[in-house]
């Protein structure tokens, strides 16, 4: 196993090459623009102002449709760095809410989206891949894919919950 010193030597070398820094900056600018686009185009979704930048593992922002917000639920639009993909996650405002809705979905047998195996240690209840291999050469097309997939995910979750009061 390498030491922190070994990792830092490699990290510094990679940062000095400049590619990682430029890619990360471009990705963060894109995610900010995506968040702004959803906020501007869908004011009914109440897109959260903040972005969680993470530790180069995941970056996300929350989308808060009123129907989910009333239930203390939210949808996160997530970029997973290592997998290089975008996902939509249904999450609770806290662990108690998360466990409650996880149990409801599990007991109902609804399987349209991937239910996390357990809530302990999980950041989500449901997960859905929006874009498996994003084309960062076509940002408007990528934005359209993420936007439409997120809206469909929200609509499906809302319909499920409407039938399970």
Image (spheres, rainbow, N blue to C red):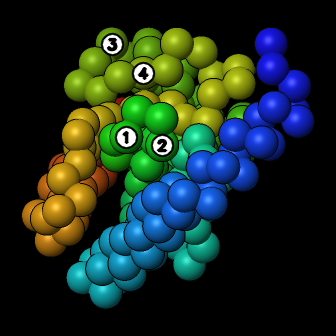
Please tell me the numbered disc located at residue 84. 1
Please tell me the numbered disc located at residue 81. 2
Q: Can residue 95 be seen?
A: yes
Distance from label 1 to label 4 (Cα)? 21 Å
Disc 1 vs disc 4: which is toward the camera?
Answer: 1
State left or right for residue 145 relative to residue 38: left
Disc 1 to disc 3: CB gap under 8 Å = no
Q: Does residue 145 sit above or below 164 in this rendering?
A: below
Q: Earlier in the sequence, mark 2 or mark 4?
A: 2
Q: Between 160 and 25, which is closer to the camera in this rendering?
A: 25
Q: Which residue is mark 3?
A: 109
Distance from label 1 to label 3 (Cα)? 30 Å
Rendered location of residue 156, percent (x, y): 23, 43
State left or right for residue 100 relative to residue 127: right
Distance from label 2 to label 4 (Cα)? 21 Å
Rendered location of residue 142, percent (x, y): 18, 60
Q: Between 56 and 90, which is closer to the camera in this rendering?
A: 56
Secondary-structure class at tag 2: loop
């Amino acid at each position: 196993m390498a030491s922190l010193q070994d990792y830092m030597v490699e990290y510094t070398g990679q940062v000095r090459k400049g590619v990682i820094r430029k890619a990360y900056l471009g990705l963060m600018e894109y995610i900010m623009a995506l968040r702004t686009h959803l906020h501007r185009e869908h004011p009914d979704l109440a897109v959260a102002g903040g972005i969680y930048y993470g530790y180069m593992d995941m970056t996300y922002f929350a989308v808060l449709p009123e129907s989910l917000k009333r239930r203390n639920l939210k949808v996160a639009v997530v970029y997973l760095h290592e997998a290089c993909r975008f996902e939509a996650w249904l999450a609770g405002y806290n662990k108690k809410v998360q466990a409650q809705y996880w149990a409801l979905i599990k007991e109902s047998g609804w399987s349209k989206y991937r239910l996390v195996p357990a809530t302990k240690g999980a950041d989500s209840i449901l997960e859905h891949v929006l874009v498996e291999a994003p084309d960062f050469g076509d940002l408007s097309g990528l934005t359209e894919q993420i936007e439409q997939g997120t809206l469909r995910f929200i609509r499906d979750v809302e319909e499920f919950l409407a039938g399970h009061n």
